[in-house]
Amino acid sequence: DAGVTQSPTHLIKTRGQQVTLRCSPKSGHDTVSWYQQALGQGPQFIFQYYEEEERQRGNFPDRFSGHQFPNYSSELNVNALLLGDSALYLCASSLSLRRGAYNEQFFGPGTRLTVL
Amino acid sequence: ILNVEQSPQSLHVQEGDSTNFTCSFPSSNFYALHWYRWETAKSPEALFVMTLNGDEKKKGRISATLNTKEGYSYLYIKGSQPEDSATYLCALYGGATNKLIFGTGTLLAVQP
C-alpha cells in the first residue's frame, strides 16, 4: 500500500513565477490537507480539500490555491511567488469526518520549494 | 488563535540517556493531540494520538502522557539510541475544523 506521495521532491523558482505541487493520498483516503513549513517553524495549515472543494482554509493569501481531482489527488498552486514562500510543503491525507469518527492524518515527504 | 508550544527547542543527549519533552496547548475545546516523529528527508511518522485526559500511551521505549485539564502532554524516551535522533512534533487536532495546529518541534540529537 503506497502511502502519501508528493512531487516534485525539490523545486527552484524565481520571484513572480507560478508553481504547482502535487499530492497523491494514501489508498482509501478522500481528504487532502496542505501545510507549509518555513525554516524554524512548525507546519502551518494552508487548506483542506474534500469532495473536490476547499473545506477549510488557514491564514494564507489568495495567491495560494488548490484543486482536488475525482481520484482524490490534489494540487497546490502558488502564484506570484515571493522569497518568503520558500519552504517545505507537506501534504497529508485522511478519511473525511463523515466516514470516520476520527481521521488521523498521514503525511507525505514534502516538496522543498526555493524561491530566488 | 490556538497556540501550541513545545520545549525544549533542541536537546543533545548521550546514547542510553532517558529524556522527555513537553507540549503545551490551550485546555479549552480539546479534541485530540498527536505526536509525530520526523526524521530528516522522510515523512512525519505518527507516534501517538491521544484523546482522553490521563491517557498514557507506549510504543517500545517511547511513551506519552496527556493532561487536558492543564493543557500539556509529555513525551518520554527511555534509553535513547542514535536512531531516535529526529524532530518530535506535537499537534493539536481541531475537531470540527479538521486541521492540525503544530508546535515548532523539539530536535533531538543522540550521540553514540
Image: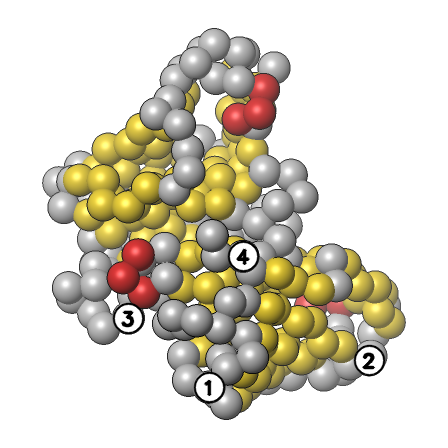
Residue type for callout 3: Tyr
Q: Do labels 4 and 1 share a chain?
A: yes
- Crowding near the residue tagged with mark 1, few <14, some 14–19, many ≥20 C-alpha atoms within 10 Å: some
| Kind of element beneath mark 1 | loop
Badge 2 is on which residue?
Answer: B16
> Of label 4 and label 1, which has the lower sequence position?
4
Give me the C-alpha separation between circle 4 and circle 1. 19 Å
Circles 1 and 2: CB distance less than 8 Å?
no
- Crowding near the residue tagged with mark 2, few <14, some 14–19, many ≥20 C-alpha atoms within 10 Å: some
Badge 1 is on which residue?
Answer: B53
Give me the C-alpha separation between circle 3 and circle 1. 17 Å
Badge 4 is on which residue?
Answer: B3
Give me the C-alpha separation between circle 4 and circle 3. 22 Å
Q: Position of residue A116 (x, y in %)?
A: 61, 15
Q: Is residue A68 above or below residue B111?
A: above
Q: Is residue B109 above or below residue A93?
A: below
- Crowding near the residue tagged with mark 3, few <14, some 14–19, many ≥20 C-alpha atoms within 10 Å: some
Q: Do labels 3 and 1 share a chain?
A: no
On the question of residue A110 being in view, the answer is no
Q: Do labels 2 and 4 share a chain?
A: yes
Q: Mark 3 lies on which chain?
A: A
- Crowding near the residue tagged with mark 4, few <14, some 14–19, many ≥20 C-alpha atoms within 10 Å: few
* Closer to the eye: label 2 or 3: 3
* Closer to the eye: label 4 or 3: 4
Q: In this view, does A33 lie above or below B50?
A: above
In which quadrant of the rendered image does the C terminus of chain B lie?
bottom right
Circles 2 and 3: CB distance less than 8 Å?
no
Circles 4 and 1: CB distance less than 8 Å?
no
Q: Position of residue A45 (x, y in %)?
A: 42, 46
